[in-house]
Image (cartoon, grey):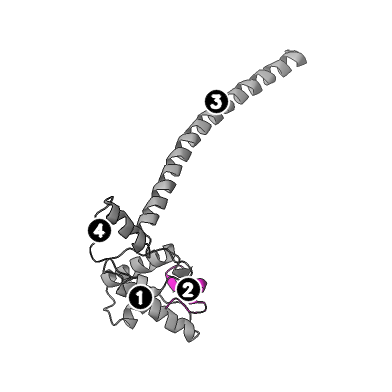
Amino acid sequence: MPSVVGLLEQRELTARRRMDELREEADRIQAELVVVEQEWNEWVIARSRVGEVLAPGDDDACEERSDRGDLPAAPGTSGAAKPKSVVPMWRAGLVWSALSADYQRILQVLADRNRLGQGPLTCQEMAACFGLDPVPAKIEALRSKAKRLVARGWLVESAPGRFTLAKSVAGPGGGS
């Protein structure tokens, strides 16, 4: 029969091996975390720079750069949105005209519902408001636009597939 001290030593050795294995795994995970964190920081910086470049209302800076010869002058730069334009992040004072006509129509329908005290809309209901055929392609196009507006802070998806204006957009002045 093994001695009590021998059993304790055996358990201690097993626990020490397990502890060493876990430390090795923790070191491996820590090293991987450092690499992923560096990649994430690079993406954050890239996203920030793209946001700066695409920010609306920065026409003066673009003109300055083109005067210096850094960048070619942007053809037809004006405050009005162009079809297929990028949806800017919502911020206080940003007007709806910064968006293309399709996005403005979505905001207008939701603003009307908000003003009448009605609830959020589904994309199928929006399609009916716009007089579109309720076919999947049209509904998915609206859903894509609505999701983009949610991601940029213009809308809120109160329940899956149900959209309404964000409180900040629907607040005083409503951005329109």
Most foreground residue, 63 or 138 = 63
* Camera sees residue 17: yes
Quick one: label 1 or label 3, which is nearer the N terminus?
Answer: 3
Disc ID at residue 73:
4
- SS class, disc 3: helix
Magenta stretch: give its range: 160-176
* Camera sees residue 124: no
Residue type, mark 4 in image: Ala
**Image quarter for residue 128?**
bottom left
Question: CA separation, marks 4 and 3?
Answer: 56 Å
Instruction: Rate crowding at label 3 as few (under 14), some (14 to 19) or many (20 or more) other CA atoms within 10 Å.
Output: few
Disc ID at residue 17:
none
Quick one: label 4 or label 1, which is nearer the N terminus?
Answer: 4
Q: How far from the left and from the top, in percent, is residue 71?
A: 27, 52
Q: How far from the left and from the top, in percent, is residue 46?
A: 39, 47
Residue type, mark 1 in image: Gln
Which residue is painted at 36% across and 70% down in the image?
A: 98
Quick one: label 4 or label 3, which is nearer the N terminus?
Answer: 3
Contact? badges 4 and 3 (CB < 8 Å): no
Q: Which residue is mark 1?
A: 104
Which residue is painted at 42% across and 69% down in the image?
A: 161
Which residue is painted at 41% across and 46% down in the image?
A: 43
Question: CA separation, marks 4 and 2?
Answer: 32 Å
Residue type, mark 2 in image: Val
Residue type, mark 3 in image: Glu
Q: Which residue is mark 3?
A: 24
- SS class, disc 2: helix
- SS class, disc 1: helix
Contact? badges 2 and 3 (CB < 8 Å): no
Q: Which residue is mark 2?
A: 169
